[in-house]
Amino acid sequence: MSPVTARAGAVLALCLSCAAGPAASQEATANGAGAELRALDKLTGRVTDLSVPARGSERVGRIEVAVNECRYPQDDPAGDAYAFLTVRETGVADPVFRGWMIATAPALNPMDHPRYDVWVLRCTTS
C-alpha cells in the first residue's frame, strides 16, 4: 500500500468516525449500485457528469475513471457518500489517483492532476 493510500484510508476513517460524534462509528453503511461523479477539464472548462456502475468505468477526455465501490449511510442514501476510485490517464502506466473520495469533503483526498479534476457527487441505488 502506498503512503498516499494509507494516509487517505486513515483520513477517511477519522472523518467518518468524528463526523457525527460517537454514534457515527456504529452507523451502518450500504453499498450503492455505482456512483455519480463530476469531471472537470481545466483546460477547456468543460464539466461532465458521469454515472458509473460499481466495478465499471467511464472515459472522459484522456482519463478513465473506474468505481470499485460506493458506500453511503444506510438510513440516508443522499448523505455522505464515499467511493473508491481509480483514475488512469491514456498512455500512463500508474494510476493518476487511486483511493477513497468523500462526496461532502473532496479536498480530504483530492486527485492531483494538471488538467482534470474528478469528484464524487453521490452513490446510485438500485
Image (cartoon, rainbow, N blue to C red):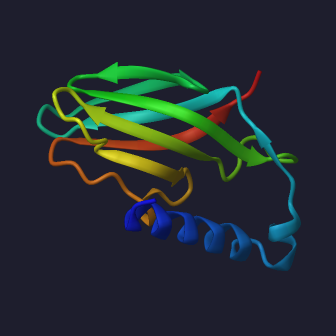
Please identify the residue farthest to the front as the structure is shown.
Answer: 1
Q: Residue at x 15, y 48 (%)?
A: 114
Q: Position of residue 41 (x, y in %)?
A: 22, 35
Q: Position of residue 5 (x, y in %)?
A: 45, 60
Residue 13 is left or right of residue 109, and the answer is right
Residue 11 is left or right of residue 61, and the answer is right
Q: Position of residue 32 (x, y in %)?
A: 71, 33
Q: Residue at x 11, y 37 (%)?
A: 43
Question: What is the quadrant of residue 86 in the picture?
Answer: top left
Q: Is residue 61 above or below residue 32?
A: above
Q: Is residue 67 above or below residue 21?
A: above
Q: If the image is split into quadrants, where does the C terminus sit? A: top right
Q: Position of residue 65 (x, y in %)?
A: 39, 30
Question: What is the quadrant of residue 3 in the picture?
Answer: bottom left
Residue 91 is left or right of residue 19, and the answer is left
Tell how many labels: 0
Residue 103 is left or right of residue 76, and the answer is left
